[in-house]
Image (cartoon, rainbow, N blue to C red):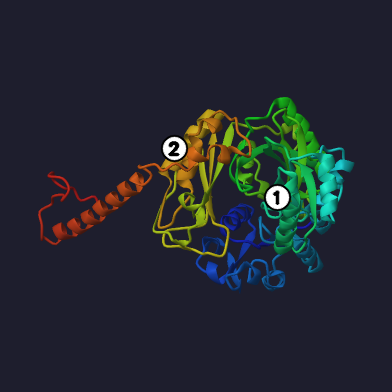
Amino acid sequence: MNHIKKILIANRGEIAIRIMRTCREMDISSVAVFSEADRTSQHVRYADEAYYIGKAPSGDSYLNIEKIIEVAKNCNADAIHPGYGFLSENAKFARRCNEEGIIFIGPSPEVIDQMGDKIKARETMIKAGIPVVPGTEGSINSEEEALNAIKEIGLPVMIKASAGGGGKGMRLVHTKEDIVSAVRAARSEAKSAFGDDSVYIEKYITSPHHIEFQILGDQHGNAVHLFERECSVQRRHQKMIEETPSPLMTPELRSEMGRAAVDAAKAVNYTGAGTIEFLVDDDLNYYFLEMNTRLQVEHPITERVTGVDLVKQQIKTAEGHPLEIQQEKLFQRGHAIECRIYAEDPDNNFMPSAGKIYKITEPLGLGVRTDGYVYEGYEIPIYYDPMISKLIVWGANRDEAIRRVRRALYEYKITGVKTSIKFLERIMNTPDFIDGKYDTHFIEKNKELLLAKDPCDNCNDMVAIAAYIDYLSKINRVQEVNQGFAPAQSRWKKVPYINHF
């Protein structure tokens, strides 16, 4: 049994801080690494130790395996937590950690390899008896082979990169005439993004619901699921809002899919936290989509409804402890929703909005949590993902959770850069979302409503600016009064002014 005393977090931003918080609760020292662009980032300030690892581009810093290993050895870190993104699903990185005697907080390199290859993962699930979307058994090696496969499967189909993720290397094909160009485009994009142009073909589910199950496994063959997350509010295959429980789910389907998720985890001897992702159609047929061999961005909503700290469980299983959680004792309590706050402009085709943040007012109150890393005066770099925080809200039921999200988004103010806050507010007021009747086409179906120009969109900003001007005016007035230059009277109101400063 290992005892971890110091963890290097091979990541940045909000996920690095979130991991460090659990480390602090467990009396484990945390080590931050940072690029040139992140010298003043909040995760650097929060950590017990921090080390520079390279220039701003991620290839020179957060993806630099040897530099991260070097820092871990020099600071005597027992373990490395990869967070999500960057090196979190990189088998080579996990293997290098093992070679250097550093605990990699995640599954084995073999499992990462096996489940990171979508074709191998699909074959593994078929052997385990998990339903998969009808499609090719292996990769497509020629355009002629693609034409023959699609003739057998039937249109529409989705062409996918074997090593894909984040929507890259994916093409939806509706007509026979588009097959060849789609295969070429998918292979080219896959080669550029992943260094591997292998693609395969799946039948396209016309009204898909993206539902994932959180799983935990230990080194002793135990595995449990912590229920589902509904992730169907997506734009270009990138999630924007997640919730749990899913409004689509029935108790019977939840139980059946939960068992399938656990079977999938056991089929590969999975250790740590992971996610089994499914597509579910309108008739509640479900199909394995992929396995994420890491912590997910949306893990806090699962923590909120189950009361389980997933990062703590990752650390304990990495130390070799058996799971203390029993499936029959896990329950969902209430309803949780996560909104991803991006520094981007929805009114300008969601262009990233890097720049300096002048003012932040974060929402507070019952059932509200924010996981972020920016602060007033911080300049958002252009080199990384534009997500700057996550708003996690809990309610006793779905209706209360939605109302609380609306309130929290109303209170959330960020000036200096464009953000997705207003866009998220509109989603919370869209009938399809309120009714829980939505699939992965939700944003496209409601585009006119979600992207409609609202003349009052800037009203709250104007009020905030006016209030700040009043605040500065009052400070100046107090100084004048204290120095005897002016009577104690507000410039804005013809009433006596009381010094509250």
Name the side, left or right, on which 190 lies relative to 56: right
Circle 1 — which element?
A: strand
Q: Position of residue 46 (x, y in %)?
A: 54, 61
| Badge number at residue 407 | 2
Name the side, left or right, on which 325 lies relative to 398: right
Distance (Cα) linking label 1 and label 2: 38 Å
Q: Residue furthest right?
A: 127
Question: In the rendered view, would you say 454 is above or below 118?
Answer: above
Q: Which residue is the site of mark 1?
A: 171
Question: In the rendered view, would you say 103 is above or below 302?
Answer: below
Q: Which of these two is toward me, 277 or 262?
A: 277
Mark 1 vs 2, N-terminal side? 1
Q: Is residue 501 visible?
A: no
Q: Nearer the viewer, mark 1 or mark 2?
A: 1
Task: Report crowding for label 1: few under 14, some 14 to 19, many 20 or more residues within 10 A (C-alpha).
Answer: many
| Badge number at residue 37 | none
Residue depicted at 50% across the width and 36% down the height: 428
Q: Position of residue 69 (x, y in %)?
A: 71, 70
Q: Amino acid at mark 2?
A: Arg
